[in-house]
Image: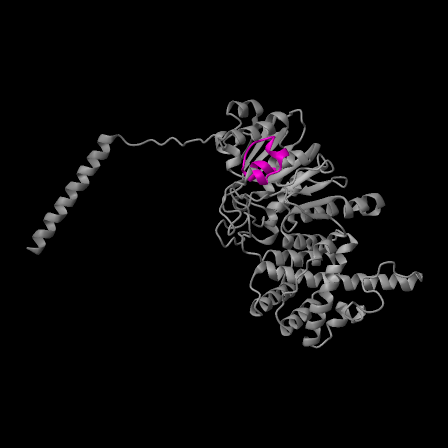
C-alpha cells in the first residue's frame, strides 16, 4: 500500500491528465501505461549496455539499435533518458512521431508486453501536458518491485466506471481472500479467462512469491513462474495492455495474456484440461446469442446465460484435480431453469463442490449492487462432493454503500488476523474468520450448527433440495420466544388510559370556563 508523498504524486499525475483534457479513466490509465513501458524499455536497454560493457559481447537484439529510425531520427534519441530533457514541443514531436511507431514495431518480438503495444495510440493532446506528465513520472521511484506494483494498483483503483459488457473491478481484498483460500503452489498453472486488469493473476503471483520464495533459486521453477504459470484472456485491447503492465510491474517477466473472447472461441486441444487453478470474476452480461457462442460449450448446457457458460468453460479448462474459485451472481445458486439446475448438478454429482461463500450485496458498489457468491470446486470427472461448506459474509471491512469507506484501521482490513481483533472488529470484517474457518472445514466446521455464520451441508441434503445452493435454503433461524400479556389485561390498561384522558379534558375545560 502506498501512502504519503508517492500517493500524492500519483494523484497529481491523475489530476494533470484531467485538467489537460483527458477525462476518461481508462484512457488516462492507457497513456500512463505506454509511458511506463517506454521508461521500462530505457531501463532494459541500460542493463543490456552494462552487460555488453562487462562481457564484451554485443547486444543480440538491442531495443534502441545503432543508426536512425525510418524517419531519420537516431534511435538513441528515442530513449526516455534522452527525450525527457527536451523542450516540450520537441518532446511532443519525438514521442508522437518516433517513439510510438517504435512501440508498435516491437510487437514482433513475441513478448506479451510488446504484442499488446503494437496498436498503441498516442492521445496526449498537447506538448505542455506531455512535458508535465513525463516530469512527474520521472520523479516516481520505479526501482523496487513492490513499489511499482502498488503504484499501478493505486492507479487502477481510480477507475470508477463499470466499463463494458458487465465488467467491473473486483475489490482487492476479495481477490486476496480467494487466492489465499486456493493457495497456489510453485508448480500450478493459473488461468483467468476474463482477466481484465489481471488482478487475480497479480495477487496469485504475489502469493506464490511470498509463500514459495525458494523457487526463484531453482532455474526450472523460476522459468515456470515467469513464462508458464500465469495465463489470462480478454477481448478488450485496452485491458490487455493494462493487465500486461500490471503483471510486469509486479515482477512477472512474460505471462501469457492473450486477446480472446472466451465464450465465442472453442477450447483448443492445447487449452483443454491445461490449468490447475482458475480464479475469475467473469462478466455477468446476461444473455448472448447461440450463434456467437462456442459450440462445445452449448453442447454441455444449452443456455444463453454468460455466467452459466463460463462455469462450463472453467470445467473444460481445468485439469482433473484442478481447483476453481469464481464469483457468480446469486441467480446461479438458485435459478430454476433447466440449465441452472444442470450446471449445479454437474458441480455436485460429477465433480466436487467444496464451498459457497455468500458475499454482502454492496461489495461491488459503486459499480453494481449485484448480489454474488464465491464458488469453490474441484474438477474430478467422478464426483466426490461430501460436505459443502457455507459461509455468510455480512461485512468485509468496508461500508456497503457507494462510498465504500474503511470501517477499521489498515492492519485490521483484509484477511490478515490481527492480534487484538475483537468481536466488534469481526462484526465489521468477517474475512479473517472466513480464512480461519476454511482451514477447519473438514474438522471443527463439521460440528457447527446451521444457526451459525458458517456450517457444512451433506451432499444428500443438497440433492434433496434439487441442487439449490442458496445459503438461506439450509440456514436455520432461531426465533426468540416472546411472551405477550393477556389481551383482557391490555384492554383494561387502555380503558384506564382513556378514562384518564377524559378526566384531563374535563379538568382543562373547568379551568378555561
Residue 425 x/y as whole percent = 54, 46
Counting from the top left corner in percent of width and height, residue 293 is at 59, 39
> Residue 141: image x %, image y %?
72, 64
- In reply to whether residue 50 is colored magenta, the answer given is no
Q: Start and end of the magenta stretch?
A: 291-310
Q: Is residue 139 visible?
A: no
Q: Is residue 76 left or right of residue 430?
A: right
Q: Which residue is pictured at 56% across the width and 39% down the height? A: 306
Displayed quadrant of residue 318: top right
Question: The C terminus is located in which quarter?
Answer: bottom left
For this rendering, which residue is in front, 482 or 112? 112
Placement of 357 over or under 160, stated as above or below? above
Classify the position of the N terminus by image quarter. Answer: bottom right
* Nearer to me, 149 or 117: 117
Q: How is the image coloured?
A: one colour
The picture quadrant where one finds residue 224 is: top right
Q: Is residue 24 left or right of residue 273?
A: left
Residue 292 belongs to the span the image colors magenta = yes
Give the quadrant of residue 242: bottom right
Q: Can residue 161 be seen at all in this image of the molecule?
A: yes
Q: Nearer the viewer, residue 301 or 174?
A: 301
Where residue 509 sits: x, y (%)? 9, 52
Amino acid at each position: 500500500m502506498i501512502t504519503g508523498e508517492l500517493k500524492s504524486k500519483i494523484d497529481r499525475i491523475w489530476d494533470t491528465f484531467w485538467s489537460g483534457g483527458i477525462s476518461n479513466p481508462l484512457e488516462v490509465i492507457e497513456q500512463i501505461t505506454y509511458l511506463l513501458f517506454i521508461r521500462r524499455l530505457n531501463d532494459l536497454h541500460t542493463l543490456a549496455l552494462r552487460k555488453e560493457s562487462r562481457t564484451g559481447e554485443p547486444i543480440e537484439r538491442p531495443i534502441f539499435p545503432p543508426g536512425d529510425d525510418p524517419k531519420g531520427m537516431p534511435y538513441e534519441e528515442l530513449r526516455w533518458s534522452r527525450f525527457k530533457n527536451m523542450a516540450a514541443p520537441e518532446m511532443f514531436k519525438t514521442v508522437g512521431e518516433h517513439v510510438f511507431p517504435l512501440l508498435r514495431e516491437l510487437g514482433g518480438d513475441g513478448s506479451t508486453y510488446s504484442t499488446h503495444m503494437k496498436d498503441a495510440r498516442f492521445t496526449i493532446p498537447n506538448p505542455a501536458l506531455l512535458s508535465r506528465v513525463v516530469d512527474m513520472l520521472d520523479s516516481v521511484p520505479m526501482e523496487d518491485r513492490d513499489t511499482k506494483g502498488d503504484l499501478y494498483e493505486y492507479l487502477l483503483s481510480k477507475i470508477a466506471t463499470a466499463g463494458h459488457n458487465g465488467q467491473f473491478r473486483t475489490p482487492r481484498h476479495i481477490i486476496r481472500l480467494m487466492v489465499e483460500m486456493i493457495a497456489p503452489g510453485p508448480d500450478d498453472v493459473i488461468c483467468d479467462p476474463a482477466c481484465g486488469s489481471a488482478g487475480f493473476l497479480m495477487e496469485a503471483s504475489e502469493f506464490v512469491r511470498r509463500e514459495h520464495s525458494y523457487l526463484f533459486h531453482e532455474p526450472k521453477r523460476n522459468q515456470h513462474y515467469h513464462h508458464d504459470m500465469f495465463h489470462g484472456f480478454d477481448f478488450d485491447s485496452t485491458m490487455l495492455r493494462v493487465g500486461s503492465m500490471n503483471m510486469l510491474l509486479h515482477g512477472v517477466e512474460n505471462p501469457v495474456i492473450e486477446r480472446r473472447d472466451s465464450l465465442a472461441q472453442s477450447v483448443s486441444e492445447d487449452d483443454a484440461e491445461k490449468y490447475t487453478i482458475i480464479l475469475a470474476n467473469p462478466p455477468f452480461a446476461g444473455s448472448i446469442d447461440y450463434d456467437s457462442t462456442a459450440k462445445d460449450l452449448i453442447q454441455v448446457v444449452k443456455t444463453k446465460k454468460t455466467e452459466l457458460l463460463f462455469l462450463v468453460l472453467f470445467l473444460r479448462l481445468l485439469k482433473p484435480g484442478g481447483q476453481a474459485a469464481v464469483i457468480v451472481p446469486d441467480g446461479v445458486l438458485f435459478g430454476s431453469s433447466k440449465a441452472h439446475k444442470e450446471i449445479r448438478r454437474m458441480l455436485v454429482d460429477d465433480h466436487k463442490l467444496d464451498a459457497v461463500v455468500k458475499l454482502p450485496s454492496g461489495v461491488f458498489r459503486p459499480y453494481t449492487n449485484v448480489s454474488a457468491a464465491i464458488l469453490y470446486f474441484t474438477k474430478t470427472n467422478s464426483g466426490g462432493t461430501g460436505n459443502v461448506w457455507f459461509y455468510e459474509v455480512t461485512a468485509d471491512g468496508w461500508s456497503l454503500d457507494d462510498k465504500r469507506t474503511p470501517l477499521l484501521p489498515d492492519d485490521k482490513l483484509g484477511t490478515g488476523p490481527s492480534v487484538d481483533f475483537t468481536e466488534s472488529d469481526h462484526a465489521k470484517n468477517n474475512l479473517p474468520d472466513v480464512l480461519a474457518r476454511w482451514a477447519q472445514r473438514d474438522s471443527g466446521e463439521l460440528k457447527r450448527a446451521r444457526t451459525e455464520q458458517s456450517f457444512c451441508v451433506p451432499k444428500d441434503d443438497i440433492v434433496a433440495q434439487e441442487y439449490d445452493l442458496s445459503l438461506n435454503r439450509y440456514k436455520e433461524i432461531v426465533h426468540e420466544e416472546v411472551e405477550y400479556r393477556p389481551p383482557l389485561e391490555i384492554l383494561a390498561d387502555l380503558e384506564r388510559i382513556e378514562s384518564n384522558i377524559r378526566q384531563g379534558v374535563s379538568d382543562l375545560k373547568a379551568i378555561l370556563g
